[in-house]
C-alpha cells in the first residue's frame, strides 16, 4: 500500500505545473526520496543518487546539504541550466517535506497557487496599510512641516508680508504656525525702527551684532524742512500728518535710488549710499534722490494749503566715513560717523546762505560725473573746517 501511495504521489507531482522545466520532490528523513515529479524509470532512494547529469536534482541536493533547516528558499548553481531556485516546505507528515527546483531562466513566480494567493493577499494588505500610513503621515505631518519650513525661509529672507498661518490638525504644529506669524509681525514692527538692509543680514545670518565699524566711501544726505517750526506753531498737533507726508516721500525717493535711511532727526532725515549695501554710482543716485525730494515737495502745496510755500533744504557730500554699529554693548545704532557726515549736515545750512534747496560738495559732483546737471555756487566756509569747501547746486 505504501508503494502504491508513493506511486500515486509521484503521479500527482508530475501533474504540477512548475514553469515547464521545474522539478518537485517529496523527501522523507534526510534526503530520502519518497516521490518525484520526473526522473529515471527507477527512482533512486536518495536525492544524491540521481544521475550526475540531472542538474535539478543535483541543485536540490546541494541546497539541502548547505541549508540545514526544513523550510527555506535559496538559489544555487545548476551548471548547464544556470541558477536554480530551490524551495523547501514542511509537509503535515513527520519528517516529510516538499522540495521544488526551478531554473531561474523559466522561473516566473509560478509557485504553489495557494501559497501565492496567501502571499498576494498579505502583500496587498501590507501595501494598503503602508499607503494609508504614508498618506496619513503626509497629510498630518509632512505637508504641514514642509509648509512651515517654507514660512521660516520667508522669515529668513525677511519677506515678512508673505508669512501666513499654516492650519494643521495637530495642536502643536498649529501653535508653532501661530508663533511664526507673531514672530513675523514682531520683526516687521522691529524693522520699522532700523534699516531693512541692516536687519535682513542679521536675521539671515543668525549672528549677534556688536559695536564696531569700518571705513567706507559713502555719499551722505541730510534733508530738512526749514519752515517746519512755523508750520508747527500754526497747526499744533495737526502738523504730524504733514511731517509724515514729507518723511514718507523722502524715504520713497531714497529707497528708489538704492539709499539707506540712517535716522530721522526731528523734521530732518539722514540717508547714506554704498553702505551697508554696495551702490557703485552712489553719488549720482544720491543726487537723483535729492532732485526727486525737491520735486515732491514742490507738489505738496497743491495737496494741502497748510503747506503754504514750504521748501526743503538738502545737503549731499561724498567721502570716507566709519560705518557700522555705534553705541553701547546693550544698545546699538547702525550709522555713519566722521568728517564726511559732518560736512553733509553743514551743507543744509549753506543752502540757506545761497538761497537754494540743494547743495552738493565738490566731491559729490566729481564722483557723480558728467551725467549730473549742476552749477557751481562758490566756496563755503564750513563750521569746524579749516579749509573752505567748493559747493554746487542741482539745476532744476
Image: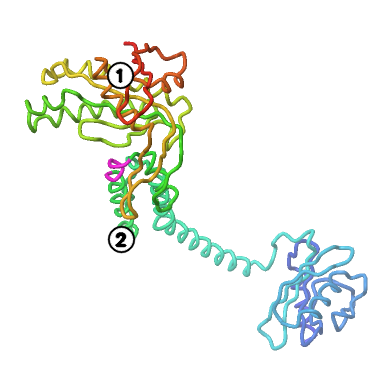
- Extent of the magenta region: 189-194
Label 2 to label 1: alpha-carbon separation: 59 Å
Rendered position, 224 above or below 39: above
Q: Which percent across, then down, holds residue 45?
A: 86, 84
Q: Is residue 145 left or right of residue 69?
A: left
Q: Nearer the viewer, residue 171 or 351?
A: 351
Circle 2 sits in a helix, a strand or a loop, which is it?
helix
- Disc sitting over residue 358 in the figure: 1
Can you give x and y, in whole percent of width and height, for residue 7 in the image?
79, 79
Residue 6: give x, y in percent of width and height: 78, 81
Label for residue 171? 2
Q: Label 1 near label 2: C-beta < 8 Å?
A: no
* In-front residue for pair 362/293: 362
Mark 2 and mark 1 lie on one chain; the one further toward the N terminus is 2
Q: Position of residue 14 (x, y in %)?
A: 78, 70
Identified at 29% across, 23% down, the residue is 314
> Looking at the image, which is closer to me, 347 or 213?
347
Numbered disc total = 2
Height in image: 158 above or below 22?
A: above
Q: Is residue 298 above or below residue 238?
A: above
Amino acid at each position: 500500500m505504501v508503494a502504491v501511495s508513493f506511486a500515486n504521489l509521484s503521479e500527482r507531482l508530475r501533474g504540477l505545473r512548475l514553469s515547464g522545466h521545474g522539478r518537485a520532490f517529496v523527501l522523507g528523513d534526510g534526503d530520502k526520496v519518497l516521490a518525484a515529479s520526473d526522473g529515471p524509470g527507477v527512482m533512486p532512494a536518495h536525492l544524491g543518487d540521481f544521475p550526475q547529469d540531472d542538474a535539478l536534482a543535483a541543485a536540490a541536493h546541494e541546497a539541502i546539504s548547505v541549508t540545514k533547516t526544513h523550510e527555506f528558499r535559496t538559489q544555487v548553481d545548476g551548471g548547464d541550466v544556470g541558477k536554480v531556485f530551490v524551495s523547501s516546505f514542511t509537509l503535515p507528515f513527520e519528517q516529510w517535506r516538499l522540495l521544488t527546483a526551478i531554473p531561474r531562466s523559466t522561473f516566473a513566480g509560478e509557485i504553489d497557487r495557494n501559497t501565492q494567493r496567501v502571499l498576494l493577499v498579505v502583500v496587498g494588505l501590507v501595501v494598503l496599510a503602508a499607503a494609508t500610513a504614508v498618506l496619513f503621515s503626509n497629510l498630518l505631518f509632512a505637508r504641514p512641516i514642509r509648509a512651515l519650513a517654507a514660512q521660516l525661509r520667508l522669515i529668513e529672507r525677511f519677506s515678512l508680508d508673505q508669512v501666513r498661518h499654516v492650519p494643521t490638525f495637530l495642536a502643536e504644529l498649529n501653535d508653532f504656525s501661530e508663533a511664526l506669524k507673531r514672530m513675523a509681525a514682531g520683526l516687521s514692527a522691529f524693522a520699522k525702527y532700523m534699516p531693512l538692509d541692516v536687519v535682513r543680514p542679521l536675521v539671515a545670518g543668525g549672528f549677534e551684532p556688536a559695536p564696531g565699524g569700518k571705513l567706507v566711501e559713502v555719499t551722505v544726505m541730510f534733508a530738512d524742512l526749514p519752515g517746519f517750526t512755523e508750520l508747527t506753531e500754526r497747526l499744533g498737533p495737526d502738523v504730524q500728518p504733514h511731517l509724515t507726508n514729507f518723511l514718507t516721500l523722502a524715504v520713497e525717493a531714497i529707497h528708489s535710488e538704492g539709499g539707506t535711511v540712517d535716522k530721522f532727526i526731528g523734521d530732518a532725515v539722514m540717508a547714506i549710499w554704498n553702505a551697508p549695501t554696495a551702490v557703485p554710482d552712489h553719488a549720482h543716485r544720491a543726487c537723483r534722490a535729492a532732485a526727486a525730494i525737491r520735486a515732491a515737495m514742490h507738489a505738496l502745496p497743491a495737496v494741502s494749503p497748510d503747506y503754504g510755500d514750504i521748501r526743503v533744504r538738502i545737503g549731499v557730500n561724498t567721502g570716507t566715513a566709519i560705518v557700522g554699529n555705534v553705541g553701547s554693548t546693550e544698545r546699538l545704532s547702525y550709522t555713519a560717523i566722521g568728517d564726511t557726515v559732518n560736512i553733509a549736515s553743514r551743507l543744509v545750512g549753506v543752502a540757506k546762505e545761497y538761497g537754494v534747496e540743494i547743495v552738493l560738495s565738490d566731491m559729490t559732483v566729481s564722483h557723480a560725473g558728467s551725467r549730473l546737471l549742476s552749477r557751481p555756487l562758490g566756496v563755503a566756509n564750513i563750521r569746524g573746517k579749516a579749509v573752505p569747501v567748493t559747493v554746487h547746486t542741482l539745476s532744476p
